[in-house]
Amino acid sequence: MSVLASAVPARRLPRAATLLAAQHQSSIAAVPRAAAIAICRARALAARAAPRRAGPAGAPPGAGTGPARAARMTTISLSLDTPELAQAYEHGSDRQFNHGKLLIETLGVRRGQRVLDVGAGTGRLAAHVAEIVGPEGSVTAIDPLPLRVDIARQKARVNLATAVGRAEDLSAFATKSFDVVYLNSVLHWLNDAQKERAIAEAARVLKPGGKLGFSTGSREKPHQLEPIQRKVLADLGRDAQGNRPYKLTVDEVRALLERAGFIADTVEILTFVDHAADVDEILKHSGSSSFGNHLSHLTPEEKREVRERLAKELEALRTPQGIRLERNLIFAIAHTAGN
C-alpha cells in the first residue's frame, strides 16, 4: 500500500509533496521468515502465557472514570503479537514509514543529534534517522513488543541501539540526555494515564530547547475505514468499539503538551490517501499494525463474515489504482523551554 497524496501545508512542510508522491520506496533487507520465527518463538509463547493487560503499558483497569472508560482500558493487549504479524508489519509498513519520514523532516533532525525513537516497531524509521544524524549522532530505538525489537536489531549499526521499552517509562535514560524524541503512530495505543506519563517522560529526557514530535490518530477526523467497519459490526450485532485505539482531538493534544511543560509549535491534522488492492490487504495491514488487536474480540466465524461484508462495502471506493481510503493523523511538534 503506498501513500499517493496528502493535504500538507506547504509553508510548514516544504518537501512534503515530494515525500508523499513517491511511487517507489527504498526497501529494508528482510529477515528470513524461518529465522525470525526461530529467534522469537520462545518470546511469543511467553507473551501469550502472560495475563492480558489493560493497555500497551499494563495500566490498571481502574484508571479513568466511568464504565465506558473502564471497558476500553481492557481492549488493547501486547500478548497477541506473533512472529508472522511482526514480519507482516516489517514488509507492509510503508504508510507509517512514509509519514514518519515526513515527521522527521518537520522536526528538522540533523547530523550529530542524539535521538530517541519511542515505539520504533521493526526499526525502519530509526534506521533512516540513523543515516541522517550520522556517526557523530546516535539513535536509540525502543518498543514494547520483543518480536519487533528482534527484527529492528537486524538493522544494527554503530550509531543505532535497540531495546525493549515503554513510552511511559524512560527511566533507563538520563534527564536532559536527548536532542529529539519522537513517537510515530504510537500515542493512540496508550490510554489517557499512559499518554500523560509518556509525554512527561519525553519532557524529562529532552535537553533544554529539545524537540518532541509525534503523529497520532485523530478522533475528530477518523480514518475513512472506521465508519464502514462500525456499520458492518453493528449489522452483525457486535460491539463496534472493540480494540479501537485511544485517539485524541487537536485541542486535547495541545492540552497534553501544555501540562507536560512543552511549548507547541505545530498541532494540525494531515490527510493521507492510500490505495489497497483488496480487503485482504487492508485487514492484513490492520492486523499487523495493531499487533493482533484489530477485530481480536470476534470469533473466527465472525471475522469471516466481517471480511465478506467489508469487501462488498469497500468496492464502492474502488478506483483504477485500487480501493481508495483517506486516513487522518494529528502531527504535533513542540519544544522544551531553553536557549
Image (cartoon, rainbow, N blue to C red):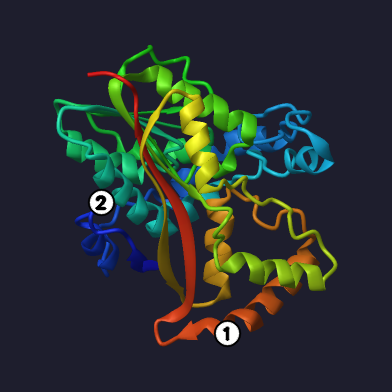
Of residues 243 and 14, the one drawn nearer to the viewer in this rendering? 14
Residue at 77% across, 63% down: 300
Horizontal side of residue 201 vs 15, given as left or right: right
Question: Dot 2 lies on which element?
Answer: loop
Question: In the rendered view, would you say 62 is above or below 11?
Answer: above
Residue at 24% across, 64% down: 17
Horizontal side of residue 231 vs 132, given as left or right: right
Q: Looking at numbered disc 1 in the image, what kind of residue is underneath it? A: Glu
Horizontal side of residue 45 vs 151, given as left or right: right
Total numbered circles: 2
- Tell me residue 283's x, y (percent): 58, 65
Q: Where is mark 2, residue-wise? A: 12
Of residues 125 and 7, the one drawn nearer to the viewer in this rendering? 7
Distance in Å between CA atoms under marks 2 and 1 = 35 Å
Of residues 319 and 40, the one drawn nearer to the viewer in this rendering? 319
Identify the image quadrant of the C terminus: top left
Image quadrant assignment for residue 279: bottom right
Image quadrant assignment for residue 117: top left
Q: Where is mark 1, residue-wise? A: 315
Q: Looking at numbered disc 2 in the image, what kind of residue is underneath it? A: Arg
- Tell me residue 36's x, y (percent): 46, 44
